[in-house]
Amino acid sequence: MARPNQGDHVPWVLCLVVSLAVASAAEAQVAARSPRIGYAYPAGGRQGATFQVKLGGQFLDGACNVYVSGTGVHATVVEHTKPMTPQQANKLREQLMELQQRRASALGGARGLGKRAAQATSKGPAKPAQKPSQAATWTAEDAKLLAEIRQKLATFVRRPMNPTIAETVVLQVTMAPDAEPGQRELRLGAQLGLTSPIALCVGELPEFKEKEAAGGPAAAAAKKKAAVKPKVGAKGKAGVKPPSAPVQTVTNITLPATVNGQILPGEADRFRFTGRKGQRVVVAASARQLIPYLPDAVPGWFQATLALFDAKGNELAYDDDYRFDPDPVLYYEIPADGQYVIEIKDAIYRGREDFLYRITVGELPRVTSIFPLGGRSGEKTTVELSGWNLPVNKLVVDGKENGPGVHELSVRKEQWTSNRVPFAVDTLPECLEQEPNNEPRRAQRVTLPVIVNGRIDQPGDCDVFRFEGRAGSQIVAEVYARRLGSPLDSFLKLTDATGRQLAANDDHEDKGAGLETHHADSWLSATLPADGTYYLHLTDAQRKGGPEYAYRLRVSPPRPDFELRVVPSSINARAGGNVPITVYALRRDGFSGEITLGLKDAPSGFALGGSLVPAGQDNVKLTLRVPTTSQKDPFTLHLEGRATLQGREVSHPAVPAEDMMQAFAYRHLVPAKELRVAVAGRPAPKVQLVRLLSKPPVRIPAGGTARVQVAVPARATAGQLRLELSDPPEGIAIKSTSPSSDGMEIVLESDAAKVKPGMKGNLIVTAFMRRPGAPGKVKPAAAQRAVPVATLPAVPFEIVAP
């Protein structure tokens, strides 16, 4: 794009300041104050229902549009409420005082009139009354306003305890009768952009909400203040003392049902139902499933507990998790007709508005385990089902319908659908484990490559497999169990024919399993030292076992591959601008090659900058350029990555994800269903503020410097423009910037102790314009406010030898 001529400099800079000041300031606010939703309550509703949902979040001004993934769910914004500022509270107090004084004056005047009337009756004519213009009046509207102000001031908090969920937005949600059941993603369109997604569920059962505490919201607020605040600690079980007087509410429900609620500090919610003798009741809570990670709570989520009581208050069943899943599930056969109560609370009596839950309860189908955990692509697999209230105990899965990957299975009993369980599909040959095989002399012989479907079917069991290997060949052994819903905590080791251990592994982290906090599946790789027989030993690290302790053991030569995650899943950008995003490469079986990134079927105007994940690196920052015109609704984009694997080109989608923090420290890539991009603001100016002139990649000597030429408006170089690197790789920085004949020159430097030759990546450069003070009040350059006005397309770099 051509630069403006000399005569265009002044108006162009004026246009920049005027047209970009609002848009770019808004862009800066989006970066620093991204709108977010912390919770949605209730977190779902029934097919065919219309109901209200309250969202708690931050920076939600101008909330006007609602976007729900999938079809059949429609929502509109009803109202937005923000906590009062101290200034607003002070104004209300002043208004309250004026109203109180007027009421006192009016009531005093009325008493005076009554006194004078009495005097006129006993002593003759009274003194003349005040003129109407001088008399204070008090109306029903005044009384109503006084009550409203008092109510608002009663809820005022100078410093909200949880500002990230202090704002609320109320939605009107309508679910079509044929809306697909399951968990959706809800995003809100606000003034500062698109929020990150929050879960909203479409259910099949009648819905109930917890009964509000007596006295309404004010009583709930008082209860929250009075509740005991437990010490922050790990998940509570036995030995945790409840508050001296835990608050309980009881709501009557009829089965089957889905119940919704929120837990405040020290609270326990109870739901009463009538049970029949012989009824096989399933009670399943969703809490962590709705909000996977809380950044400021330990262990990082609402740790719900479930208990079932009879009419006399006797505890019949209790659970604080289900196997390795933090969300508890109860199974109970009702012993006699009568009243029963379900109780839910936090394990250590914490609580706040985002400690929310959904509980399904009734004689509902529930799959607890399957075997095998997967099957071969293109073939039919008979799957055994275990659980409660199931219509069948076997299911035939046709591998022709699903390609390689992890899919979901469920069954339906009458009008109710069971929970969904994962089922893996692969292309390798498969076999079943055969007992007895618990020691090398009885080891089961397998031929590589193979996937073995087996079970650690009793505590202390060990499954051993033998195979023939050749010297110098590399093998990989990998367990899929925990990632497929099995409670197995695998331990895997490889030995030679003499029993000498060659490799072993307990837990192998899979960053693609964003909801796992204990990566309990094993993975090992080894180069075989000689021709001969080798043994793989598989057991449970905690010496547990049972029919549900199933696994898939893949033994094969390395199968290099990769997955991709793109963060964030909600992107906000100014029209015509560039916005930074991050792509993570999850490499498999030693794959270290470069991955080329691209947009798939993207609308016109979108483009990637720096679209390459360098060889050997696990992530890269790049930029997404958006169209030059704003759009009312966000776009849905699809990214993909291409790489050459063992001589063939392979393409994989980049799964959108949220980079979530758990308990102040740990980070997880939690997959999302959609990648949404909101484009807003005024169109970009015809001439870009800055653009790269140097030919990429920029080569920076290790321990040295490199010069980069950037085109900028001529008048902007005189102390007005500042260029900064956004979150650069460690060891790379801007040493200096200076005017040049083409605009500006950036001198990049590298620290030889922190970078090595061959290192590659992208640099994200942001341009800031100093905003001068008001007319007549000239501020020194150092005191002028810097406003970000543009982000360059990602600048590829490479570290080279000095």
Image: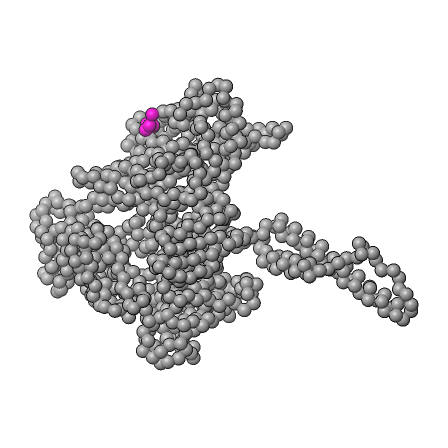
- State the image coordinates of residue 107 (x, y, percent, origin top left): 76, 62
How many callouts does the rendering have? 0
- State the image coordinates of residue 438 (x, y, percent, origin top left): 15, 63
Determine whether, in the image, residue 135 is placed left or right of residue 315: right
Q: Residue at (8%, 48%) from the top-left corner?
A: 531
Determine whether, in the image, residue 70 is placed left or right of residue 156: left
- Per the rendered image, the range of residues in magenta is 695-701
Q: Residue at (69%, 58%) from the top-left corner?
A: 142
- State the image coordinates of residue 608 (x, y, percent, origin top left): 34, 35
Determine whether, in the image, residue 466 is placed left or right of residue 315: left
Of 443 and 69, which appears nearest the observer?
Answer: 69
- State the image coordinates of residue 679 (x, y, percent, origin top left): 43, 40
Residue lying furthest right: 124
Residue lying furthest bottom: 336
Q: Is residue 661 visible?
A: no
Of 75 and 707, which appears nearest the observer?
Answer: 75
Q: Is residue 645 visible?
A: yes
The colour scheme is one colour
Question: Quarter of the image containing the N terminus?
Answer: top left
Quarter where residue 537 is shown: bottom left
Quarter where residue 481 is shown: bottom left
Residue lying furthest left: 531
Question: Quarter of the image containing the C terminus?
Answer: top left
**Is 645 located above or below residue 126 in the figure?**
above
Q: Residue at (40%, 61%) from the top-left corner?
A: 48
**Is 291 located above or below residue 564 in the figure?**
below
Q: Residue at (49%, 41%) from the top-left corner?
A: 29
Of 526 and 740, which appears nearest the observer?
Answer: 740
Does the stretch in magenta take in 224?
Answer: no
